[in-house]
Amino acid sequence: MADPSEFELLGRVTIGQYMPTGSVLHRLDPRAKLCMAAALVATVVVSQSLLGLTVLLLAVLAALALAHIPLRFALAGLRPMVPFLLLLALLQVLAIPQYSANARVLWRWAVLTVSDRSLIAGVLLILRFCVLVLSLSLFSFSTTTTELTHGIEHLLRPLQAIRLPAHEFALVVNIAIRFLPILAGEAERLMKAQASRGADFGRGQRNFIQRARMLLPLLVPLFLVSLQRADELAEAMEARCYLGGKGRSHLIQLQARLRDYVALSIMLILAILSIHLNAIQADQVLWTWLAKNLSHLL
Amino acid sequence: MSSTTRRIVVAGVLGAISIFLGASHLGFIPWLAGAALTIMHVPVIIGAVLEGPWVGLAIGLIFGAFSLLQAAIAPTGPTDVWFTNPLVSILPRLFIGPVAWLVYKALQRANEVAALATAGVAGSLTNTVLVLGALGLLRFLPWALIGTIAVTNGLPEAVVAAIITVAVVAAWKRIETGRKGSTV
Amino acid sequence: MSEPAAPLEAGQPALIRVMGLCHTYLRGTPLETPALHGIDLLVAPGEVIGIVGPTGSGKSTLLQHLNGLLRPQGGEVFVNGVRLSDPQADVRSVRQQVGLLFQSPEDQLFERFAGDDVAFGPRNLGLSADAVRERVRQAMEMVGLPFEYKDRLSTELSQGERRRLALAGVLALQPRVLVLDEPTAGLDPQGRQDLLRFLSVWCQSPGKAIVLATHNMEDIAELCTRVYVLREGRVILHGPSREVFGQCELLRQMGLAIPVAAEAMCRLRQRGYAVAGTALTIAEAAAALKALIHG
């Protein structure tokens, strides 16, 4: 069956899916969720401890359950990535020479070396990715884009005090998100008009020359139309006395509740725990403990 | 003279284009061995050239944040594993705009079109070098491989970025690009 | 839905044949929207077909099936014998034979110089540079634009000239069927007259046909031989224009206007005056009134 959705771009332009399950996580203040997401990303990036990451992984899985998101659905996003994950983990384990300095080499063949550090790095890669994917997916399942933009705006407001353009940037994000469907519509119209005159936008095997020739007549008018609309929007805003963010009042006020503080505290505890496990080299401790006691058990 | 309102709106609109090119996969041009040339950084360059370094920074931030989100929420390939790290996806992208702007300003008086093309190349190379650099420093890839990718992907990507930048900005600002009439 | 009785010339196959066409947008996603539910349509050479209906009735969706932009999800579409539901169908040739002009086509000009935009189609056909030039010249002259305009910036042309340029871009493909979506929307009266005159002359060449989707009933009255009335993705009414516009009550219930002349005759009939037939143009209405007064 020929691909009937050759031109249906609008359907593909979604930034994550929102699943309204009405759980407590959905009702958290978006600012809390943003802070938690940021803290989580930071902790994951910094973490070198298998234990620490495992703790985070378990926490995210618990959060998914709390949000009434079916686990199979959440993991479905990970499935297509498994081959790539394994490949890249293998790359880490075998082919990064930087690990072999100051590490115990376990196996060597030509340019490939396996050291204890590279092994751990491989597992860490997989763990980090899983935690990040699951937690950011959870974030997108439980937060609408409107909440997101409000949250960003409110969070950035205190920065206004130190002369950083918080309100302006939040407005930029807002405009971008609202402009997306319009853009998709324009692109679709352009593609259809050009396809009607023989341009070939079919998906599938496309080599570089064909793709490049097909793109330029599409891109230039897309940019020009967008810039034109930007001009019109700016004029319209100024015609309605938009003078910048100073002293502007807001229609939507966000109220922080007890549950938000509770959630933030939990996140803080998890982050500290994870970093602490990192700092005390908990992995080493666990290995040595296992090594000692397993020989007793066996 | 450009107003703040104008800058905000242009940043938003071009940020949307960057997101759109990524989300719809129109921004991926197939290249050798499965890797693709990408053009999602071109709106950053164009925004910087038209409205200044701050706008370039804002669009770069949007581009970076979206590439992180896309890598985490709907991953489709090996690169998405790396881009879940903000040091790879967000930090390098903040520099694309300011670098492109500096290069453009430096050459603008000499020749407008050359300035645009060079800004396109410079912005694109900034993206390539800083992202690959992050991948190297974080030990995701061996340096030898990084060098190869920089040349085989980074250079053609820079050329494509230059072409698009010139085409769009010249048309927008009604600059003469040398052709005086149709080629019919 | 039975096949409409169309005046097919003996032995000549229909240019376009649509049977039981169904289409749903974004099928399989939460944003699924059904658009067409079993449409039958026939376009024979020499005809000017009108498609009317309220917004959202599926007119644009139907038009996009006529040149293969959208492929049938259910039912069949045949263009000059090419079956569009076949994944191997030669869509490129269909798009050359059926030229589709979208709404506000002047917004879709993308080349810097006017001539290049018209040349886009012929170049995609792989014609030689000389052949392309000849096609562009012919197309531009057909729409009343001097060939010298080819070197002008598209942005420098007036809106009417830009629309003519867009039409030239489609004509340069030398299609057999012209499909137009709201072609006169936004044009001044002179521009509209010029376009309608051009269209009526164009489809008099042998083997050509026109399909016109519009809200503007006067356009239908002036040009169309047969009309299809669409509502919510279904054909509610079809037939020769006179017959269709005679059903003023039904059309009014659907929220559709009818040509002024037909409306006037309709209201007269409602008040008990025995006016003959259905008038489509002012001239016909005047003649009918004269007959009524003197007869």
Image (cartoon, coloured by chain):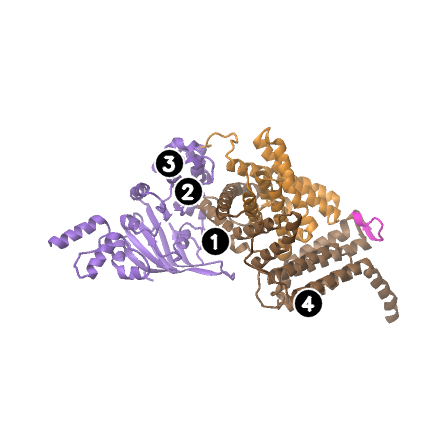
| Residue designated by label 2 | C106
Which of marks 2 and 1 precedes in the sequence?
Answer: 1
Whether A139 is drawn above or below C214: the answer is: below
Q: What stretch is highlighted in magenta?
A: A97-108
Q: How crowded is mark 4: few (under 14 residues within 10 Å), some or many (20 or more)?
A: few
Is A88 positioned to the left or the right of C211 in the image?
right
Q: Colour of chain A?
A: brown
The answer to which of B64 and B184 lies nearer the viewer is: B64
Q: Where is residue A24 in the image (x, y as percent from the top left)?
A: 62, 68
Q: Amino acid under label 4?
A: Ala
Per the rendering, the colour in which chain C appears is: purple
- Chain name for mark 1: C
The answer to whether any part of residue A20 appears in the image is yes
- Disc 3 is placed on an element classified as helix
- Counting other residues with Cα less than 10 Å from the Cα at mark 3, is it few (<14), some (14-19), or many (20 or more)? many
**Circles 1, 4 touching at the beta carbon (< 8 Å):** no
Q: Which of marks 2 and 3 is nearer the N terminus?
A: 2
Give residue A62's mark.
Answer: 4
SS type, badge 1: loop
Q: What residue type is labelled 2?
A: Glu
Residue tagged by mark 1? C87
Tell me whether the residue at label 4 lies in contact with that at label 3, contact meaning CB atoms closer than 8 angstroms: no
